[in-house]
Image (cartoon, rainbow, N blue to C red):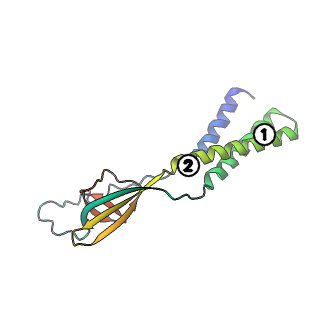
Amino acid sequence: MNIKQIGGVALVSASLALAGCATAPAGSYGPGYGSGGGYGAGYCQNCGTVTRIDRRPVEDSPNVIGPVLGGVVGAVAGKELARRNTDSQGRRNVATAGGAVAGAIAGNAIQNRTQGGYVYHVHVRMDDGRSTVLTQSDVSGLREGSYVRVQDGRAWAQ
């Protein structure tokens, strides 16, 4: 097996591992985009002022999907490489197991990197006197004193 074939198999394996860990974009510009609030828009029941933002680490959750997917991809890649390079069944088995271990380690690292590490608790004092706390993965430029609209479980800057 030549270098181009090995590189191609490695590229396909890495692409499959990364595709399994990808997340979809939010796909929203947030509320108020093009809504034309302007003058005389009236009272906003869902608006308020940010009083505090706390950054907290994400609770540890089990990492299962990344290592399992990486292990499967690694095992398949190892088996394919060994099938083309050796006639020994023992060497094929070792290559399959080694590929599975390497893939699981890579999958775990990719999942840890993509999961982020913090959530934000955004405390908002609503215009009508109520207080609410929202948990968000990002604050999108919000800070204490920002005027926000609370919609879909998060605070959006106005």
Among the 4 quarters of the image, the one containing residue 85: top right
Tag 1: residue type?
Answer: Ala
Which residue is labeled 2 in the image?
Answer: 112
Between disc 2 and disc 1, the foreground one is: 2
Q: Cα distance, mark 2 to mark 1?
A: 26 Å
Q: Which residue lies most toward the left here?
A: 40
The answer to whether residue 79 is visible is no
Q: Residue at x 60, y 55 (%)?
A: 63
* Label 1 Cα crowd, 10 Å radius (few <14 / some 14-19 / many 20+): many
- 2 or 1: tag closer to the N-terminus: 1
The image position of residue 136, as x and y in percent, is: 40, 59
| The label number, if any, that marks residue 95 in the structure image | 1
- Report which quarter residue 56 is drawn in: bottom left
From the top left corner, tell me how far across and down residue 47 is, in percent. Answer: 24, 66
Q: Quadrant of the N terminus?
A: top right
Classify residue 141 as left or right of residue 13. Answer: left
Query: Which quadrant does the C terminus fall into?
Result: bottom left
User: Looking at the image, which is closer to me, 25 or 97?
Assistant: 97
Check disc 2 and report its element: helix, strand or loop: helix
Q: Residue at x 84, y 34 (%)?
A: 86
Please state the horizontal and vertical placement of residue 135, each as a whole percent of the image.
40, 62
In the rendered structure, which amino acid carries the disc numbered 2?
Asn
Q: Is residue 115 above or below residue 32?
A: above
